[in-house]
Amino acid sequence: MAILDKVYNPKAVEEKWYHYWSENGYFRGHLPAKGQPAFSIVMPPPNVTGSLHLGHALDNTLQDILTRWHRMRGDATLWIPGTDHAGIATQARVEEELAKEGLSKYDLGRDRFLERVWEWKHQYGDRITRQLRLLGSSCDWSRERFTMDEGCSRAVREVFVRLYEKGLIYRGSYIINWCPRCRTTISDIEVEHIEEAGHLWYIRYPFKDGSGSIVIATTRPETMLGDTAVAVNPSDERYRDVVGKTLVLPLINREIPVIADEYVDPAFGTGAVKITPAHDPNDFEVAARHNLPSITVIGKDAVMTEEAGPYAGMERYACRGQLVDDLKAQGFLVKVEEHTHAVGHCYRCGTTIEPLVSPQWFVRMAPLAEPAIQAAKEGRVRFVPERFTKIYLNWLENIRDWCISRQLWWGHRIPVWYCQQCGEEICSREDPEECPACGSTALEQDPDVLDTWFSSALWPFSTLGWPDRTPELEAFYPTSVLVTGRDIIFFWVARMLFMGLEFMGEVPFREVLIHGLVLDAQGRKMSKSLGNGVDPMEVIEKYGADTLRLMLVTGNTPGNDLRFHPERLEGTRNFANKIWNAARFALMNLEDYEPAPLERENLTLADRWILSRLNKLVLEVNACLEAYEIGEVARMLYEFFWGEFCDWYIELIKPRLYGENRRERQVAQEVLVTVLGKSLQLLHPFMPFITEEIWQHLPGERGSIMLSSWPRPVPEDEDEQAEAAMGLVMAVIRAVRTLRSEMNVPPGRRAEVILVSGSPEDREILQRESVYLENLAAADRVQVVAALDRPPSRAATAVTSGVQIFLPLAGLIDLEKEQARLEKELQKARAELEKVEKKLARPDFRAKAPAAIVAKEEARAAELKSTMAALTKRLSYLGS
């Protein structure tokens, strides 16, 4: 039998096994046989421009755990991978490359530029999928999709045309979020609102008739150049008499009215607000209600337009500075206050967003949102944890129409053409050759492309072949579960739900497992600017993929953020080494092993106990995986394997493995192989590589562990009596070990142990299983009695599980020397306690020292008192 290498080397294992699994087609999903359960999941498509970060690693590890579990359960399992074309990010990346050549996209023209983007995609676009393989992702790579591949593109056009034909897609001029750097619109949920320190400028607007003025407060004085009204709340008594009067806009001298609108908050600033319809979404709606004009004074390049008068051509913030100076010089600036407020930024590049009025394409959301709301309320889709249902519903119930057009060249071009002859608007599944209204061939396609999230909203059914009714679509839609981060519930999850309901008539997934973000050790988001990012590839290079995977999920609970502590990697690597060393020990003691049916009548207490604990573990693991408590499963597996299996069971059976009794050795080997094998199977979804390597070394013809049958509960292994009995024995062993340690008994010196118990059942167990105390507690002789006439002289004592334990010390240690050592320690602790208590008694210390310092000293005093009590107790053992 081949023995494992002395040291576990992840590099030598991981690439080998991933290649083996992939080459043998083990990842491929197959249509379910009759009556076979199906499990399907789609990978949230990472950006084709991206590289693996810890969020990806966590997300895909969770998906892989579920996929491997269902595959081992015998389900028809399909995990579809893919990438997103990432319109803004990819175009920006290629434009950066062009700039190095001294070129712009306009130098190439649209067609040649798109050729360059495709070249870039083919050259660099599979980097993140290569990294996902290194992580161990067992998805069906033969079905890998790309949001701009032929099938997905066909689905996108079909969806657009159907929604257009139903009147759910329309074109109109509304206020949108414009990124001056990316030079495109972005949707409301792609705007990150960041608290920034700014100012509130109070500006005096005089009445035309000279009867005084109104003071308004604004955070963006440069937009006043586009003001078309000043608004007050109709219930605000301060302004009731001025509603309808005319003001003169400072610096520009434009006449504007005072209007009343419920939108105005009387408590903000002066209770009077400027209305700039072209540069504020709320003002845009106020203007629509009052039929006000809209004047654009900031352009798409964030430079002031001709409408800005003398400020035309100035960058928006330079204009702000000049305009404030001019207001002050002309007596219109009343005061300036410090003011912190939320400022919208582009979530991709961080540039401050500029609200602008622009003709764009929109999806009418209310009709699509209603079925998605009902699906959640009726339980047809379930969020894990449940609290995210409320967040999802709140967004959908207050949803606004979705701006889907983007001013880019890379992406799904909007399938609408305009006739240059008669102005007809043509939306078509196929590129039209002539105008259906006038027959002209002078057609021009809309230059914009669709929001990237439009195509990814179709992902659960477009990846399965829709609009064709493919066998895969019939078998695997709806998918079983979506695993995703809490930060894209609105971006993606909600949109997939209303698209799936609209086009498939059913939710795209039954459950949504929400995980949190991976933060740094201080609880901050990881970012380049903070320099606190962690590259998963570097972690895998140093520790191996199994270590990273298990570290990311252990103790993690659904929906909650996870702090990345580098030292946890060391602990998880130690666990991988523990698995390796335990397996290596087992294999070294299986040289003469011959597989045979388990002889239950020959099982020892330790055998019955570990089999019962394993049986309970299988039940608990299944229950937790069903509930998506994946982090809890990782914790249970860690504690069972390291604690119960390695630290206890392997130690308990060593005398039988090393002994001469062939039958006893064979039973111990059989149980050892059974527990190790099932433990590896339970661990496999979490740590696929190390478990496969060890599995292949176990005796017998086994095939790949990933295709082995998931462990099932064995009713006959359930043995509460064995667990209770072994629990008693283990408690006594721990107590004896603690006494030996406290009294400095040399490890090699065996000692008499006296156990006193009033329970006949417990005495019978301890007497029968005393060999375990002899082997694991270095007991020379174990006496088990119901009572003692008097306690033994000079004996350390403890009580556990109703059993009083005596450890006679005579002959074990030098009693006088130990007594002197303990008394010296006691004096040292007493002296230090006196110093701490004197400090704490000083009024000036408690009054002036920081609370944390005072608390630290109080904790130190409590610790010293505890130490003194323990030392006094040990000294009492040494008395006569």
Image (tube, rainbow, N blue to C red):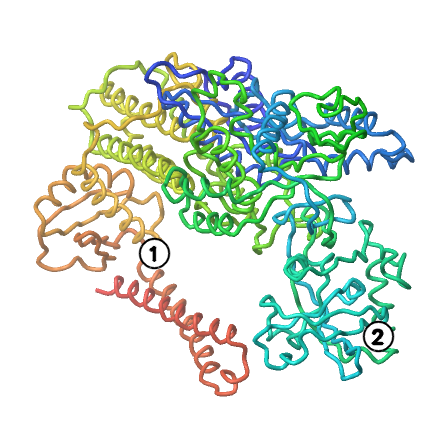
Which residue is denoted by mark 1 in the rendering? 742
* Label 2 secondary element: helix
- Mark yes or no: residue 738 visible: yes
Q: How crowded is mark 1: few (under 14 residues within 10 Å), some or many (20 or more)?
A: few
- Does 428 sit left or right of 774 as displayed? right
Q: Residues within 10 Å of mark 2 (few under 14, many from 20)?
A: some
Q: Is residue 789 above or below residue 243?
A: above
* Label 1 secondary element: helix
Residue 146 found in image quarter: top right
**Residue, x 82% and y 50% (percent of image)?**
301
Q: In this view, does 81 lie above or below 297?
A: above
- Looking at the picture, tell me which residue is in the foreground, 356 or 646: 356
Compare marks 2 and 1 and give the one earlier in the sequence.
2
- Does 99 sit left or right of 479 as displayed? right
Which residue in the rendered view is the most extreme toward the front? 438
Closer to the observer: label 2 or label 1?
2
- Residue 302, percent from left and from top: 81, 53
Q: In this view, does 828 lie above or below 241?
A: above
**Residue, x 44% and y 70% (percent of image)?**
860
Cβ atoms at labels 2 and 1 below 8 Å apart: no
Q: Which amino acid does label 1 sit on?
A: Glu
Q: Which amino acid does label 2 sit on?
A: Leu
- Does 611 sit left or right of 151 as displayed? left
Residue 651 found in image quarter: top left
**Residue, x 31% and y 48% (percent of image)?**
737
- Residue 63, percent from left and from top: 48, 32
Which residue is denoted by mark 2 in the rendering? 327
